[in-house]
Amino acid sequence: LWLNWFPISGVAPDGTGFWTHGYYLILPALPLVLNLSGYIARMTRAGVIEAIAADYTRTAVLKGLERREIIFRHVLRNALTPTVAVLATQTGYMLGGLVVIEALFGIQGLGNLVLNAAKARDFPMLEAGVLVMAAIFVLSAAAGDLLLALLDPRQRRRTSP
């Protein structure tokens, strides 16, 4: 089957603009995004259903707040809390998938660097690549925690022992 919708290579020719580079990255990014999108959508849906049935939403409706304010301030804010937590921790799986995607599409990136270092038994380069991936994972987890603190005020009041 040959549809010719997207370029097979994930690398845009030299001298092309920003949008062309983005167009060339659609096909490599698709498996990474589709892998998590169903899970994230299911979690968000369950959170929204739970938040709509909650007492605080009913109270907001009885107070006469606008529908938009109820949805954004009360429902989505509480529904997205577990979704953000899961999304922050799924970064590790996406980094693992990045190694495979870069190898399949011939993209020169961090995943390809780690893979080539492992093949060549270049342990210092392998350690550096894995360290960068670990730093990305830790930073994404920290960003997720910060976003959780913004979404849920109870997270801000929590003190560590």
Image (spheres, helix red, strand yellow):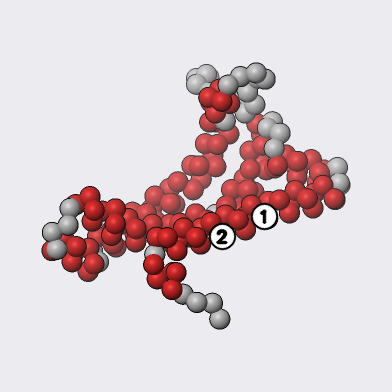
On screen, residue 120 versus residue 107, left or right, reads right
Q: Residues within 10 Å of mark 1 (few under 14, many from 20)?
A: few
Q: Residue at x 56, y 81 (%)?
A: 161
- Say which mark, if any, is on residue 142: 2
- Residue 11, percent across and down? 65, 26
Residue 160 visible at all:
yes
Horizontally, residue 76 falls left or right of residue 148, namely: left
Which residue is pictured at 55% across the width and 42% down the height? 32
* Dot placed on the residue nearer the N-terminal end, 2 or 1: 1
Q: Position of residue 50 (x, y in %)?
A: 29, 63
Label 2, secondary structure: give it. Answer: helix
Q: Which one is in front, 153 or 123?
A: 153
Residue at the spot 64% in from the left edge and 48% down from the top edge = 96
Residue kind at label 2, given as amino acid type: Ala
> Which label belongs to residue 119?
none
Residue 135: mark in rendering: 1
Q: For the image shown, how many numbered marks are present on the structure? A: 2
Is residue 1 visible from the viewing direction of this image? no
Amino acid type assigned to the residue bearing label 1 in the image = Ala
Is 34 placed above or below 76 here? above
At x 37%, y 54%, the residue is 44
Label 1 SS:
helix
Q: Give the alpha-carbon distance from disc 2 to disc 1, as whole Å.
A: 10 Å
**Left or right of 29, for residue 147:** left
